[in-house]
Amino acid sequence: MTELTAPNVVASSTRSDRRRKILQNLLRGERPYMLYIAFVILLVVFSLSSPWFLSVDNFLNIGRQTTLVSIIAVGMTFIIIARQIDLSVASTLALSGMAAALAMSQINNSWIVGAVAGLGTGALVGLLNGILTTQLSIPSFLVTLGSLSMARGLAMMVTNTKPVIITNETYFAIFGEGTFLGIPVPIAWTLAAMIIGILLLHYNVFGRRIYAVGGNPTAALYSGINTKRITTSAFVLTGTLAGLAALVLSARSHAARPDVVQGMELDVIAAVILGGCSLFGGRGYILGTLFGSLIIGTLNNGLVLLGVSSPMQLVIKGAIIVAAVAFTKR
Amino acid sequence: MELSGSGTAEPGTSTSLLMVSAINKRFGGVRALRDVNLEVRAGEVHALLGENGAGKSTLIKILSGVHALDSGTIEIAGRPVEFDSPAKSREAGIAVVYQDLSLVESLSVADNLLLGREPRARFGFVRQRALMARAEAFLNELGIPLDTRATVGSLPFAYRQMTEIAKALMGEVRLLILDEPTSSLTSDEVRILFDAIGKATRRGVGVIYVTHRLNEVFEISQRVTVLRDGANAGTFVTAETDMKRLVNAIVGADRSTPTGPRTEPAAKRELDPLPVLSLSDVSNDRLRAVDLSVLKGEIHGLAGLIGSGRTEILETVFGLRPLESGAIEIEGRRWLPGGPADAIEQGIALVPEDRHVQGLVLDHSIERNVTLPRISHFSRWGWMQQRAAARRAETAVARLSVKAPGAFSLVRTLSGGNQQKVVFGKWNDPRPRVLLLDEPTVGVDVGAREEIYAVIRNAVRDGSGVLVVSSDLVELIELCDRISVIVNGHVARTLSRGEIDDAEELHHLLQIYQASGPGHLQELPA
């Protein structure tokens, strides 16, 4: 009897627990709801001030423009929740793109070779970042500051700063220009990254461990968690996603260039923080990150449509990011 | 001592330094303080007792200007005062030493003592030598053995606490409030602290002494005030009361006295002769040839000073410190610890010394914390089984009677005692073979302490072996079947409970072994 009833009681109480928590958050105006409200306000403001903003084409445009940031931001969410930072993602993207394009041009012009080379290079940079951070106990800020420079330098060295042209049509279709179930593939890849991120972070043991390592690394260690391996895994995941972003970018532009997306790591970090991750670790979620990067993408797009000069765009974007974080922080 | 003793013996004749009359404080719907009175005289040590949540912290926060009172009056030396900020309270001569330390870890002891009032030369340059000299002179006057040049962060916890107290005593202090100052001190350090308090009271400083350790009340205080449920539960002249009456006032007459007879006298219980854990000749950077065994169903205590290697024995068994030589056996089988995960796999559990730093993720829920050590038990192919995890947490909350709104409450919002129960909850299912406990009841109120003792006794009744480190010798005497005295990383002697009469005797033994061999391990009696 008791055995039969107990699970139901527990389940209902946890559900009501969650419902109460959501209600409390709403009433107190805490994240994540403020984030969604901010996004809606942004949409309304741009819709009212620009006739071109509110259209399916423009939204697809925003989606396509935010692809790179969104894909990498999924990995960055894991990293920041684990109390680390990765400044090298933009350089990793550039290096991975070069690796993919060169591998294809050298070996049979095969898209599979390109994909493996791109993802593998990203994963390798992530692995090195992770190993240096955890084994040598160097703060990840410094490790990735170093790899930011090294990866960019390597990307430029391999061809002496020249771009590498890609000619494989299948590669373009899969990563850049085709559609999947009617969705442009860059957006489909973003959604795939998001879904994998949600599953890993919120429904997998790995996610639990990431939260514990970031929430209190010592307590995690004392609970039998291999904190070094978990932290390293987060870096490998992020590097691999930077590799995926490189495939998308190079397939869209039919070439890999060593000097692309400089400074994009700041947009990625801003998206994750806007999305509700705590820089002190232990807190954050993937859906928040998606909205964080959508806010940044929408800002970029809307300000262009309004004809704001590009220096002024930078000022407004920076101010809105700081204001949004100040407004939504606990 | 005689001087201050005769001064406080006749109430009314000595001046009251602090007079708190009928103060009330509400937080939302909760009445935290109801018509609370407190009088402290100059040169008096006045102990303040009560369970967690009885209102001690609220009262202290009002006195220190952190909270404003709703009604009532506070007088200092006969003059009414109103504090609207901590600065005002400090100005009136009230200094508080909090449990959470307020020192800058990267600075030296001297820098910390004179923080914000450094002797300065022109253009704001600090006169480093004058600063050192002033700090040193002050410490000498108080008789506190601290190196002014030492970096605070590198000091053992007890010395940081002394720095904190010394810092509080600098300047014009008339009333010193100490909030559980001894919770992490060894008996030697407590002695030094008590000496320092004695020096302060002789200069006419009044002291409010908050503690959970009743024996200290009798040692140091002249009077005691007990709070219960936010109201006065009695003020006693220490010399005219006893332990039993104080405990009654603290827990309330309706609850049975926790000092009553136990379930079963520890020494008389039949023990399984098979050791669940045995260490032979275990050595590493902090341990020298440790021989130790914990029997099935035994509570084995480790007594010793801070830094003696007590904690390091637990850490070595749990795989947090490498084993350099010697052997560890679990239920008779040789085992080489490969890290915490490996130890957990072997059925070893650790309730660490500092629950905030080592035991819990404070910003996460009870459920997240409780499921952490055996998280793979709540997953299939790596995917979390949220229901099973929630069920496990609900069971732990119910079994350990954690007072919380639910299993998804954040651990940070719980009281110290309930947080400690959550740490125990991480390990209660499946039953650990060896339960390692490091200071299991530090910062825990009397009621929760009894509940934790019950949890420990239940664990051994179910067949676990317990190895417990504690600075509270009364606790060791109450709990343990055998007690090992640890000196300088070595087991100086193992005694069965029958060989020791009381905490006093254990205290003497510790002193003797400590004195007989500081640094001379080979010459120690085996």
Image (cartoon, coloured by chain):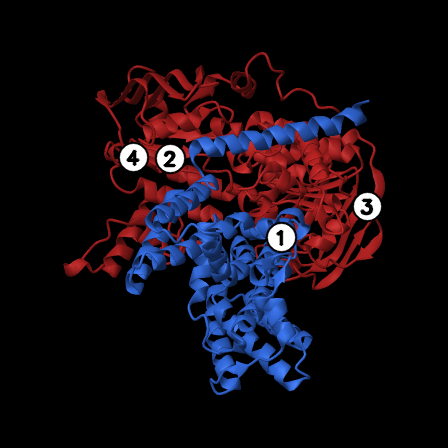
Chain colours: A blue, B red
Task: Give, as a three-letter code, the residue at label 1.
Answer: Ile
Please state the horizontal and vertical placement of residue B217, each as a whole percent of the image: 48, 27
Which is more toward the observer, A268 or A173? A173
| Rendering coords of residue A295 (x, y %) | 43, 52
Q: In the drawing, does residue B429 fall left or right of residue B486?
A: right
Up the image or down, B434 lies above or below B208; here it is: below
Q: Secondary structure at mark 3?
A: strand
- The crowd level at tag 4 (other Cα within 10 Å; few <14, some 14-19, many 20+) is some
Taking depth in this image into account, of B444 and A34 the one nearest to the observer is A34
The relative height of residue B2 versus residue B256 in the rendered view (above or below) is below
**CB-based contact (under 8 Å), mark 4 and mark 1:** no
Q: CA distance from mark 3 to mark 2?
A: 47 Å
* Earlier-in-chain disc, 4 versus 3: 4
Helix, strand or loop at label 2? It is helix
Q: Earlier in the sequence, mark 3 or mark 2?
A: 2
Looking at the rendered structure, the kind of residue marked 3 is Pro
Could you tell me how many numbered marks the image carries? 4
In contact (CB < 8 Å): disc 4 and disc 3: no
Q: Secondary structure at mark 1?
A: helix
Kind of residue indicated by mark 4: Pro
Q: Earlier in the sequence, mark 2 or mark 4?
A: 4
Q: Chain of mark 2?
A: B
Residue B284: image x %, image y %?
A: 66, 61
Q: Dot 4 corresponds to which residue?
A: B86
Viewer-proximal residue among B292 and A219:
A219
Give the labeled residue for mark 2: B198
Q: CA distance from mark 2 to mark 4?
A: 26 Å
Q: Label 3 belongs to which residue?
A: B275
Disc 4 from disc 3: Cα separation: 55 Å
Q: Which residue is mark 1?
A: A195
Distance, label 4 to label 1, CA atoms, is 50 Å
